[in-house]
Amino acid sequence: MDALTEEALQAEIDRELRLVDSAIAMVRSGSARRVTVVNLPHGAAILEAARARAALHRLSVNPVGSTDDSPCTLAVDAGDG
């Protein structure tokens, strides 16, 4: 993989993590108990980082199942709190 491709991939991963961070902020603020983030082509790659970020606020992040090979969907949940 060349440097430009690696840079583009990292930019996409960073963008997806920012989307998850926004969802975490919404749930954390009480605006919603669950926020679903869709169309994350690198969702599987960011899942553990997303879970770690959510756990800091006692929230959870879980993949939402799909019946096809569509991009990953992640749900940020407030939990049973």
Image (cartoon, rainbow, N blue to C red):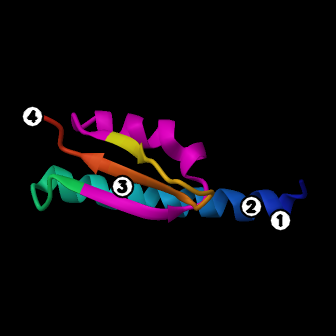
Residue at the spot of label 4 = 81
Q: Distance between the residues labelled 2 and 1?
A: 5 Å
Q: What residue type is labelled 2?
A: Glu
Query: Cα distance, mark 1 to mark 3?
Result: 25 Å
Q: Label 4 vs label 1: CA separation?
A: 43 Å
Q: From the viewer's perspective, is 4 left or right of 34?
A: right
Secondary structure type for disc 2: helix
For disc 2, the neighbor class at 10 Å (few under 14, some 14 to 19, many from 20) is few
Select label 4 or label 1 by which is in front. 4
Pointer 2 residue: 7
Mark nearer the viewer, 1 or 3: 3
Say which amino acid is labelled 1.
Leu
Q: Which contiguous range is marked in magenta? A: 35-60
Three-letter amino acid code at the position of disc 4: Gly
The earlier-in-sequence mark between 3 and 4 is 3
Q: Distance between the residues labelled 2 and 4?
A: 39 Å
N-terminal of the pair, mark 1 or mark 3, is 1
> Of callouts 2 and 4, which one flags the residue occurring earlier in the amino acid sequence?
2
The answer to whether the residues at label 3 and label 4 have Cβ atoms under 8 Å apart is: no
Residue 12: percent from the left, percent from the top? 62, 63
**Which dot marks residue 4?**
1
